[in-house]
Amino acid sequence: MIIEKFRRDHTPAALPGRDEENIPVVVVQMLTDPGVARFYQHLLEVLGAPVRRTARKHDLEAQALSILKRVGTKVLIIDELHNILAGTSPAQREFLNLLRFLGNELRIPVVGAGTRDAYIAIRTDPQLENRFHPIILPVWEEGDELSRLIQSFVATFPLRKPSFLNSAELQRWVLARTGGTIGEIAALLRSAAVAAVEGGEEAINQRSLQLMKYRGPAERRRLTEKLLT
C-alpha cells in the first residue's frame, strides 16, 4: 500500500499529444523464480514493452536499461525482494550482482521491499548492505493514530449507520487479534463490515465483531498446526 501510494503520488498525468511516456517511479515484483532473465522479462512487461521469450539475457538487459533511461525513471522499487532466497546459492549471487549493476548503470536509487528475509539476503553482500539502508515498519500500537486508521477504513464501507470504534478496549482487542499489521487490521474490519450488512446491523458493533468470519494470524497458525498433527 505504501509503495503504490508513493508510485501514484510521483506519477504525472499523461499529457495529450505526447508520445514519450514519463515513468519516474517503476515498481516491479520479484518473482518466485529469481532468475535474471525472467526478472528482465517481467520488468519489460511492467514497462509495457514487447518481450521476445527467446531473447538472450544480454539483449533483455540492454532493452530494459534503454527503456528505463528513455522514460526518465528516477526510482526503481523491487517488491517482494525476499523471494531472492527461493533460488539456489548461485542464482542468489547472480541477482545480488544484478542489484549492484542496476544501481551503478542507472545512477538512481534502487529500493527493495519485503520481509525480514529480504534484509538477510542483502546482508550476504557487504557492498550491497552499505547501499541499502534498512527502514523497519513497526506494528501499530494503541493510540490516536490507530483510531484514525480504523475510522479511515470504516469510512469506506457502505454501512448505513455510524460505527463507534474509538475505545481503548476495542483497540487492544483489534491489536491482539491482528498482530498489529495494517493488512490484518483491514481484513478484520472488512470481515466485520460484511457481518454487519448480512446481520442487518449496518454498523460495526459488538455483535458484528462476534459474527465475523475473520481469523487472525495466531488463530490460523493454531488451526494449521492442529490439522497437520
Image (cartoon, grey):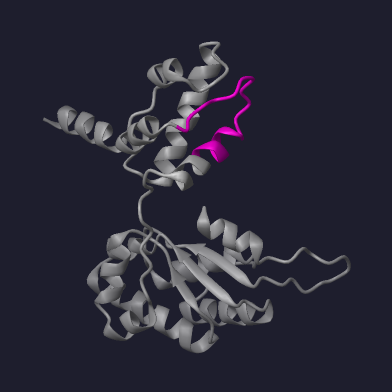
Residue 8 can be seen, yes or no: yes
Position of 60 with respect to 131 (left or right) is right
Residue 161, given in percent of the width and then of the height, sits at: 61, 20
Residue 62, given in percent of the width and then of the height, sits at: 55, 82
Q: How many marks?
A: 0
**Residue 162 vs residue 159, the one in the foreground:** 162
- Magenta highlight on residue 123: no
Residue at position x 31%, y 42% in the image? 179
Q: Residue furthest left?
A: 229
Residue 54 can be seen, yes or no: no
Tell me where residue 108 sits by quadrant.
bottom right
Residue 174, given in percent of the width and then of the height, sits at: 37, 34
**Residue 147 vs residue 32, the one in the foreground:** 147
- In this rendering, is residue 190 above or below 208? below
Quadrant showing the C terminus: top left
User: What secondary structure characterizes most of the magenta part?
Assistant: loop
Q: Residue furthest top?
A: 200
Position of 228 with respect to 100 (left or right) is left
Position of 66 with respect to 2 (left or right) is right
- In this rendering, is residue 195 above or below 141? above
- In this rendering, is residue 3 above or below 24? above
- Magenta highlight on residue 152: yes
Residue at position x 48%, y 19% in the image? 195
The span shown in magenta is 150-166
Residue at position x 37%, y 76% in the image? 133
Residue 221, given in percent of the width and then of the height, sits at: 23, 36
Residue at position x 62%, y 67% in the image? 47
